[in-house]
Amino acid sequence: MSTCDDLAPQLLEKIKEWNAQALNKLRDCYFRMGVNLLKKEKCLEMEAQDICAAFFEKLWIKFTRENGWKIEDFKSYFSTSIIRQWAKKQKKEQHVSFDDFLLLKEDLFYENDTEQEHLLKLMERGLEILKNKNPKCWELLDRFYRGDQSMKEIAEAMGYSSENVARTTKNRCMDYLKEIIKNLDQK
């Protein structure tokens, strides 16, 4: 009987031909291994399952749309991809918790939960104002902080000439948002 590693190249070729059964077989071979690998990285079971499921959905899209795309060692590719996705998710959760916005702490220092709640409300209101006044800025920040997109992905999707231009724009948008929040706090 063949192992998953032996079957992977054949299954990947079948996936290129829109063979959903091949995708399911590949998923069956590697899914549990991936979940266990992520759990060793302190990922919760459900999150690990979500990451692995998303990997196979993206694999289907990539393989059926991009002819000639090859993976030499599927197991390594799979392991690296899901661990990278877990790391991105961890980073995203930090951003969603407004770690970067808390740089405002210098100007809007809070000493207790009530003041922290006040700051979070200011941030939410500031984001609403930003969305209305400068939708492109809001979209860029949303793509980066909540959409988990890299600066390269943002540059391509939003039409910036380079990652550096997108990064500079992100920093300016962040400064603009901070200014909005400071003005709200003074009212």
Image: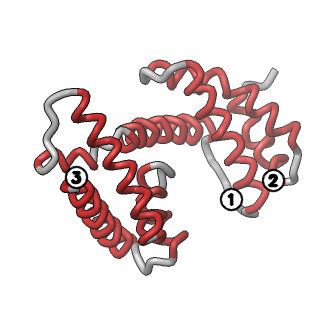
Label 1 to label 3: alpha-carbon separation = 52 Å
Q: Are marks 2 and 1 in contact (CB under 8 Å)?
A: yes
Answer whether residue 151 is visible to the viewer in this image.
no
Answer with mark 1 or mark 3, whichever residue precedes in sequence: 1
Q: Nearer the viewer, residue 33 or 47?
A: 47
* SS category of the residue bearing label 2: helix
Q: Is residue 45 left or right of residue 63?
A: left
Q: Position of residue 150 (x, y in %)?
A: 44, 57
> Dividing the image into 4 quarters, which one contains the C terminus?
bottom left
Q: Position of residue 81 (x, y in %)?
A: 53, 41
Residue 114 against residue 124 in the figure, above or below: above
* The furthest residue to the bottom: 161
Q: Which residue: 54% across, 36% down?
A: 82
Q: Position of residue 176 (x, y in %)?
A: 28, 67
The disc label shown at residue 69, or none? 1
Answer with mark 2 or mark 1, whichever residue precedes in sequence: 2
Q: Amino acid at mark 2?
A: Lys
Q: Which residue: 46% across, 63% down?
A: 131
Which residue, given by chain and number where applicable, does mark 2 sit on?
16
Instruction: Determine which quarter of the picture holds residue 98.
Output: top left
* The furthest residue to the front: 187
> Dividing the image into 4 quarters, which one contains the N terminus?
top right
Label 2 to label 1: alpha-carbon separation = 9 Å
Q: Nearer the viewer, residue 91 or 61?
A: 91
Residue 14 against residue 97 in the figure, above or below: below
Q: Is residue 22 left or right of residue 78?
A: right
* SS category of the residue bearing label 1: loop
Q: Amino acid at mark 1?
A: Trp
Q: Which residue: 70% across, 55% down?
A: 62
* SS category of the residue bearing label 3: helix
Which residue, given by chain and number where applicable, does mark 3 sit on?
185
